[in-house]
Image: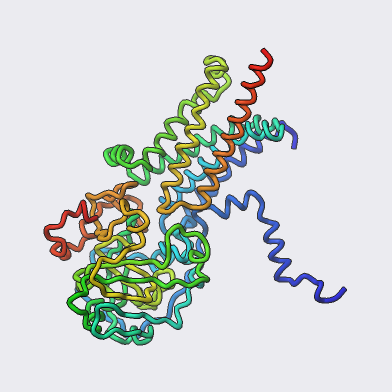
């Protein structure tokens, strides 16, 4: 027998694994909650200064493990545990972010330049998911406003569109996630320029785990989590309201504004309460997720209509 | 396996998820949101058992097997058992006995309404699943009542589908399986009627 006829070990081991998959394992494979995978930490960020204005001392922070194991990131899979299990499928180097559209100085940034463009501060924010769960997360980053101003937005820049990376090896991209890619999000320019809106590159003083939107993402704490685009590659300033992935998918369920609002329900569930991850009982959801300072952005707007 | 061992074996298998879920819940194996995981797992179990219950008669029709009929009642009872645990997890742990919130949830949201509707449909079927009730109702009436299980299968399917923000392939696969099972029985019933007409 020639050595080329010998089944390579990797192959026959795989074949055995395959044979183990009976009807029982078919159920187990599609089982919605699976065990804990080991969560990898990113490298420590140099010089992160806590911003005392956003220390949120009254709230208990969620653990790194909670923040990095329970995620919505459909490019890495649709179950909550998928993004952390498939985290390695996102490549974060090389990485560029293009800032374009209605700006005097468009620019293509390398991620290393973004990391050094402004001093990085720690801000503890509440995060409220549209699915009625929430966390408290110590983000590391800097205000998006200063970053955008560097590009000298023109008077026609009324909206800001964000685009998430599409990499063919990501399981949601190559498989079936139900939503179209690239993932698109957007903000009105005054929302993007609000001092709360963050360009985040880390959490707990470490580079973002891939499943949390590495290497750079947006954080808009008064809106449902899906508004905070992850792993962004493009920021486009424009005159018209940009299409956004979830409102295009189901406009009656997800609006462009998507401000956290306990009195406007999702068609399938109530938004009045939420479960803080790590807690047993539900707690009341706060208007604008407890950030009343943004209320003036929506003066005179019917928030039931513009949900 | 001897036929005598079939029912106890099926009983034991249907019980297995309980200690497993209990252990996972206690040791943090259900992840960062254990309440949600428990709720989903119990609902998933009830749904799978409903599909298994619905598969018993078509297996007899298509393959001529009679052993599935021996465990059909057991599977149906366990389906209801897990549906009850699912409902209890929702009302007690998830909603914390907030009956105002629960009522609003059921009335306002189709997703919750379908789940509650399924449980309500299963309730009379579970109560009358005994031989005694079969006798009391008469087989014809009993059979007519238990056709509700198809409706329960339909409602449960849509409840399961709406639980995710986007349709999942696995949910669609389960829904197609249930539809195929109903189709087999519909065809068999139509044939039976045809032969009855031909040979009075």
Q: Indicate the quadrant where residue B10 lies.
A: top right
Type of colouring: rainbow
Q: Can see residue A143? A: no
Residue A62 position in % (x across, y down): 35, 65
Label total for image: 0
Q: Is residue A278 left or right of residue A40?
A: left
Q: Most extreme residue toward the top, as rendered?
A: B200
Observer-nearest of A107 and A295 = A107
Q: Position of residue A165 (x, y in %)?
A: 42, 73
Quick one: which residue is furthest to the right in this view?
Answer: A1
- Which quadrant does the C terminus of chain B fall into? top right
Residue appearing at x 20%, y 75% in the figure:
A156
Q: Quadrant of the N terminus of chain B?
A: top right
| Residue B128 as seen in the image, left or right of residue A195 | right
Q: Is residue B83 above or below residue A271?
A: above
- Residue occupying the point 58% across, 52% down: A28
Which residue is at 30% across, 82% downward? A48
> Above or below — where is A284 with respect to B121?
below
Residue A17 in sight: yes
Please state the horizontal and vertical placement of residue B75, each as a whole percent of the image: 58, 35
At x 49% / y 28%, what residue is drawn?
B148
Horizontally, residue A294 falls left or right of residue B102, namely left
- Residue B38 is left or right of residue A236, and the answer is right
**Residue B52 in the image: x percent, y percent?**
59, 38
Residue B36 against residue B179 in the figure, above or below: below
């Amino acid at each position: 027998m020639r050595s080329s006829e010998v089944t390579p070990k990797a192959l026959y081991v795989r074949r055995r694994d395959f044979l183990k998959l009976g009807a029982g394992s078919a159920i187990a494979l599609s089982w919605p909650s699976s065990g804990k995978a080991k969560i990898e930490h990113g490298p420590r960020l140099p010089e992160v200064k806590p911003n005392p204005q956003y220390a949120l001392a009254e709230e208990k922070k969620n653990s790194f493990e909670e923040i990095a194991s329970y995620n919505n990131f459909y490019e890495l899979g649709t179950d909550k545990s998928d993004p952390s299990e498939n985290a390695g499928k996102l490549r974060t180097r090389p990485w560029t972010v293009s800032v374009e559209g209605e700006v005097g100085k468009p620019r293509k940034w390398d991620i290393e330049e973004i990391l050094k463009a402004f001093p990085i501060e720690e801000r503890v924010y509440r995060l409220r998911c549209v699915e009625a769960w929430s966390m408290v997360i110590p983000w590391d980053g800097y205000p998006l406003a200063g970053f955008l101003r560097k590009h000298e937005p023109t008077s026609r820049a009324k909206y800001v569109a964000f685009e998430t990376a599409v990499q063919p090896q990501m399981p949601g991209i190559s498989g079936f996630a139900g939503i179209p890619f690239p993932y698109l999000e957007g903000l009105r320019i005054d929302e993007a320029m609000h001092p709360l809106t963050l360009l985040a590159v880390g959490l707990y003083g470490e580079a973002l785990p891939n499943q949390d939107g590495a290497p750079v993402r947006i954080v808009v704490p008064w809106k449902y989590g899906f508004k905070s685009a992850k792993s962004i590659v493009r920021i486009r300033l424009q005159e018209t309201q940009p299409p956004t992935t979830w409102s295009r998918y189901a406009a009656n369920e997800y609006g462009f504004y998507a401000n956290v609002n306990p009195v406007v329900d999702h068609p399938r569930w109530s938004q009045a309460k939420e479960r803080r991850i790590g807690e047993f009982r539900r707690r009341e959801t706060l208007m604008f997720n407890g950030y009343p300072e943004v209320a003036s952005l929506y003066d005179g707007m019917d928030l039931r209509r513009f949900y | 396996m001897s036929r005598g061992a079939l029912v106890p074996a099926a009983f034991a298998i249907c019980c297995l998820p309980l200690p497993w879920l209990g252990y996972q819940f206690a040791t943090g194996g259900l992840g960062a949101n254990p309440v949600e995981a428990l709720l989903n797992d119990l609902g998933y179990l009830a749904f799978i058992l409903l599909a298994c219950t619905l598969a018993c008669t078509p297996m007899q029709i298509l393959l001529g097997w009679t052993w599935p009929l021996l465990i059909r009642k057991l599977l149906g009872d366990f389906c209801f058992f897990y549906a009850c645990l699912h409902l209890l997890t929702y009302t007690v742990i998830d909603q914390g006995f907030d009956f105002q919130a629960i009522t609003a949830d059921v009335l306002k949201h189709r997703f919750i309404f379908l789940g509650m509707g399924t449980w309500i449909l299963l309730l009379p079927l579970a109560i009358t699943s005994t031989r005694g009730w079969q006798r009391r109702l008469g087989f014809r009436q009993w059979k007519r009542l238990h056709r509700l299980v198809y409706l329960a299968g339909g409602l449960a399917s849509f409840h399961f589908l709406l639980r995710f923000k986007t349709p999942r392939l696995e949910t669609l696969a389960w829904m197609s399986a249930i539809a195929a099972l109903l189709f087999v029985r519909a065809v068999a019933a139509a044939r039976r009627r045809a032969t009855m007409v031909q040979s009075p």
